[in-house]
Image (cartoon, rainbow, N blue to C red):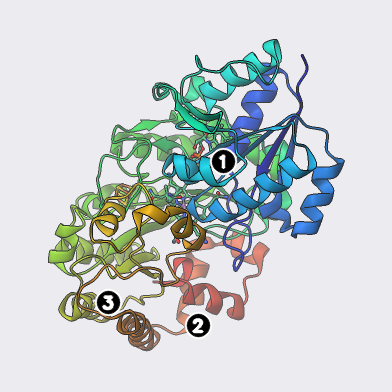
């Protein structure tokens, strides 16, 4: 029986432009089209920033039996609304949801939405098995043999066994279906670099266990091979004329041999490509040679989650990083004229005046602005979420309300400290950001930043014509303007 599939990417972070490709959903588009030969309609609400009326009109005009939807925790409210709209327009459609919002809140989402089935892990294998069965036996067939899903059956939630992790990403996963995405929108809003910048996710699983971080992919590092990545980049250069790749992996530098291999192959196959990646102070501090090699191989930015400059707080968040390593990292980046985009967290359990002042003093001493100072936010699935439940900061009997309100970590949500009142915590953050920025602006002027950018980006900067105003804006939001 032929089935028509509609895939929806809900909007996220409306205050900013759409910069990041919806990797998970776009991979599923490719898998479904190529492995099952099913035509898919992709509705990218985030890229087009459609309003509710426009979404309704598109849904009314689209022919579908199955809807796939997913996203991050803050998309919870949109997914609920969309599921109701979909069932209103097409009561017989089956709605399948997946992604971070679902994996960490299965029951709550199923009970409070019109979603029928949720995918509890990686989607590649599960979606093929599920849609294949729907194609062969109809969409109301029994699905108790499909691994990696939960579903509603007569108002009960049924849990099937988990699907095991993919072993070889190159074989069992795919690239996102770029041709189905509004690439011009994504490519005109760079993620970390400048020019036509595309983000890539090439790793699943992180060996660390930071208490504020959600890790549905476990602690074993699984990665696409360098050959797979290089082939993808060469394709993107030919088809979309990209200038820049931002590797947004949890931790791009975990496997040092892989980083060396990437640099060598980049030099061989795409020598004028510029790129950025995620890093970690404990790795960079011990591998200056590698940083130099990365810089010589087109890497113009490594971003860091420094989180705190209180060793007590770092230990309690299990960051596995020392203040000395952070200072050394700053020195190494400055030595090679690389920017130093660092994010910090205020308000973890145990935070007090002393620990937050240590962070501020570190930034003053090392001339770093605290532009990316986030509030500790208990996203579901993290250890600090469990802490917030145990200490009754989150009411475990009303997780629906909690999920409707969770958003960006730049906005205050829940106070995990015993020391600060809510107002004090909000004020402390503002004060830290203000003082560190005033200090940073004495350390370097916009002209000084412009000069460093010219050295780093060379010809690309002429092509992109980044003006001072733009640079000022980006400097204030961390990232490329922090040297
Ligand atoms: C890119 C990214 C973003 C992008 C969003 C991109 C987008 N359009 O969705 C941006 C920069 C906007 C972002 C923002 C935030 N992010 Co973010 N982000 C990521 C990152 C680095 C990659 C996500 C990704 O693409 N993964 C790769 C794809 C392949 O995986 P996937 O989407 O999960 O898809 C697979 C499965 O989940 C499943 N699947 C997914 N959807 C569906 C749907 C169906 C129907 C099915 C069947 C299966 C399925 O199949 C896919 C293939 O296996 C992850 C960390 C990481 N490495 O994963 C953090 C991560 C997702 N982010 C996280 C957080 C905390 C945030 C913020 C809240 C942080 C903040 N500072 O406030 C903000 C949200 C802001 C807001 N206002 O809402 C957390 C997750 C929290 C949560 N529970 O949702 C993560 C996991 C980081 C972490 N380790 O803690 N983020
Ligand atoms: S914060 Fe970074 S290093 Fe820590 S567990 Fe998460 S992804 Fe890994």
Q: Residues within 10 Å of mark 3 (few under 14, many from 20)?
A: many
Residue 249: image location, x then y, percent: 42, 45
Residue 417: image location, x then y, percent: 24, 71
- 2 and 3 marks in contact (CB < 8 Å): no
Tell me what residue is drawn at x 30 percent, y 41 percent: 254
- 2 and 1 marks in contact (CB < 8 Å): no
Outermost residue toward the right?
61
Mark 1 near ligand 1 (CB under 8 Å)? yes
User: Could you give the CA–CA distance between mark 2 and mark 3, rounded to whole angstroms?
Assistant: 21 Å
N-terminal label among 1 and 3: 1
Residue 282's mark?
none
- 1 and 3 marks in contact (CB < 8 Å): no
Q: Which residue is more in the foreground, 411 or 262?
A: 411
Q: Is residue 262 left or right of residue 26?
A: left
Tag 2 secondary structure: helix
Q: Quadrant of residue 336?
A: bottom left
Residue 447's mark?
2
Tag 1 secondary structure: helix
User: Could you give the CA–CA distance between mark 2 and mark 1, rounded to whole angstroms?
Assistant: 37 Å
Reading the image, the residue beneath label 1 is 23
Q: Which residue is more in the foreground, 74 or 314?
A: 74
N-terminal label among 2 and 3: 3
Q: Residues within 10 Å of mark 1 (few under 14, many from 20)?
A: some
């Amino acid at each position: 029986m032929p089935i028509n599939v509609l895939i929806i990417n809900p909007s996220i972070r409306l205050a900013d432009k759409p910069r990041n490709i919806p990797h998970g959903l776009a991979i599923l588009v490719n898998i479904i089209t190529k492995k099952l030969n099913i035509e898919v309609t992709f509705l990218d609400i985030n890229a087009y920033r459609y309003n509710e009326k426009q979404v309704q009109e598109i849904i009314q005009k689209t022919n579908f039996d199955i809807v796939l939807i997913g996203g991050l925790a803050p998309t919870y409210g949109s997914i609920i609304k969309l599921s109701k709209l979909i069932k209103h327009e097409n009561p017989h459609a089956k709605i399948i949801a997946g992604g971070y919002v679902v994996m960490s809140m299965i029951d709550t989402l199923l009970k409070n939405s019109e979603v029928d089935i949720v995918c509890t892990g990686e989607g590649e294998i599960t979606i093929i098995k599920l849609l294949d069965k729907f194609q062969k036996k109809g969409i109301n067939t029994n699905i108790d043999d499909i691994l990696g899903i939960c579903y509603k059956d007569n108002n009960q939630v049924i849990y099937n066994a988990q699907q095991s992790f993919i072993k070889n990403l190159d074989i069992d996963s795919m690239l996102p279906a770029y041709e189905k995405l509004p690439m011009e929108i994504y490519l005109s809003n760079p993620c970390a670099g400048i020019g036509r910048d595309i983000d890539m996710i090439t790793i699943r699983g992180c060996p660390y266990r930071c208490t504020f971080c959600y890790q549905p992919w476990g602690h074993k590092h699984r990665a696409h091979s360098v050959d797979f990545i290089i082939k993808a980049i060469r394709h993107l250069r030919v088809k979309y004329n990209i200038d820049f790749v931002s590797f947004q992996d949890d931790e791009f530098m975990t496997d040092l041999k892989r980083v060396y291999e990437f640099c060598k192959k980049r030099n061989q196959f795409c020598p004028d490509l510029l790129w950025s990646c995620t890093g970690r102070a404990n790795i960079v501090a011990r591998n200056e040679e590698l940083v130099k090699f990365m810089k010589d191989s087109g890497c113009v930015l490594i971003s860091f989650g420094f989180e705190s400059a209180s060793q007590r707080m770092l230990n309690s968040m299990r960051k596995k990083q020392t203040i000395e390593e952070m200072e050394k990292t700053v020195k190494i980046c400055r030595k090679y004229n690389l920017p130093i985009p660092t994010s910090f967290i205020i308000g973890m359990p145990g935070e007090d005046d002393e620990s937050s002042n240590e962070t501020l003093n570190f930034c003053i001493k090392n001339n770093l602005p605290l532009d990316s100072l986030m509030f500790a936010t208990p996203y579901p699935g993290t250890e600090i979420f469990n802490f917030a439940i145990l200490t009754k900061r989150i009411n475990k009997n009303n997780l629906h309300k909690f999920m409707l309100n969770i958003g960006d970590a730049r906005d205050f949500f829940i106070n995990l400290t015993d020391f600060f009142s809510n107002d004090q915590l909000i004020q402390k953050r503002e004060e830290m950001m203000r003082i560190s920025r005033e200090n940073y602006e004495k350390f370097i002027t916009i002209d000084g930043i412009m000069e460093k950018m010219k050295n780093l980006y060379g010809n690309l900067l002429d092509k992109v014509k980044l003006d001072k105003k733009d640079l000022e804006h980006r400097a204030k939001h961390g990232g490329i303007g922090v040297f």
